[in-house]
Image (spheres, rainbow, N blue to C red):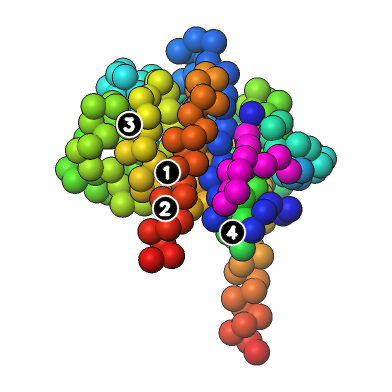
Amino acid sequence: MTALYNHTARTHITVTCIICFHFVSIQDVTAGSLYADGQQAFACNAHLADRARWITAWALFDQRLEEQSQMRALIRNAS
Amino acid sequence: MNNSPGPHWYIDSRPAASTEQMSLDLTRHLPRRLAISPVVVVTDRPAVLLSVVRKRWTAITREVARQFASTLDRQKKAGLQRELDHMRNCRFTVQPFTEHPTADCFFVSPEELCLGLAPCYSTLYLASRLSDVDLCIAVQNLSLNGLIVGYGDWLTGYEESLRAAFMGRIKDIRI
């Protein structure tokens, strides 16, 4: 179970799973890598049991972010 | 990407029916968090857990290599290669930060918490129950968008301590 602890209290929010892309309660996910803007990315706890899918999905997630950041750098340099 | 803005800690209470289940969960979760910044694992027997995690880490690295070899998808291949490089370069230690500052994952016992933790880490795994005081020491260098993973449901009884530690950190930063 994950919960967000911010300034005021423990709060429960809805987040997107990076593996199945469903909106799920933060209680049903676990924190993984970060998005390019530093925000936390999550995946459903249930996916952790499927080792192959878990590894591939996160590897792809990180790779896409890397490619997006390279693309942004290229565009910045070109302009 | 619909998280709340501003400083926050994520608290993840994960099941720990057995030490084996805990080490398996920890090892599967670790690569993601080690991609962000150093990790601290607090456990009663750091050397034992380190050895178990290392063994499981080798198995996961082999699994990534197997997946890499079995895909033709260019993006997937690049991602898995990146993952492999990262996993092969991760360094685990039971030594304190002062003695091994370049390590990525520090295994410490509750008694060793005061010997000096990494100046900043984004993830704190609590594999054994801590006292209020030890918990406050353990979170003192946790980044303000960090994750606390507690094995077992004991962390829920420590909300007040965490709240105080969190508010203390916010106050330090504002000053």
Residues at marks 3 and 4 touching, judged by CB atoms closer than 8 Å = no
Left or right, B42 with respect to A11, comes to left
Q: For numbered disc 1, what is the local secondary structure?
A: helix
- Name which residue type carries label 3: Asp
Residue B116 image-quadrant placement: top left
* Span of residues in magenta: A2-13
Disc 4 marks a residue whose amino acid type is Gly
**Nearest the eye: A41 or B87:** A41
Q: Which residue is mark 4?
A: B6
Query: Both on one chain, marks 3 and 4?
Result: yes
Marks 2 and 1 sit apart, C-alpha to C-alpha, by 6 Å
Residue farthest to the right, as pictured: A22
- Mark closer to the chain start, 3 or 4: 4
Q: Residues within 10 Å of mark 2 (few under 14, many from 20)?
A: some
Task: From the viewer's side, name the closer residue of A65 and B125.
Answer: B125
Q: Residues within 10 Å of mark 3 (few under 14, many from 20)?
A: some
Q: Label 2 is placed on what type of residue?
A: Arg
| Foreground: disc 4 or disc 2 | 2
Q: Is residue B46 above or below residue A67?
A: above
Q: Within 10 angstroms of label 4, few (less than 14), some, or many (20 or more) residues?
A: few
> Which mark identifies residue B169?
2
Image point (60%, 69%), residue name:
A70
Parent chain of label 1: B
Q: Which residue is mark 1?
A: B165
Above or below — where is B159 with respect to B72?
above
Residue A25 sits in quarter: top right
- Residue type at the position of mark 1: Ala
According to the image, label 3 marks what residue? B134
Q: Mark 4 and mark 2: span between their CA atoms?
A: 13 Å
- On the same chain, marks 2 and 3? The answer is yes
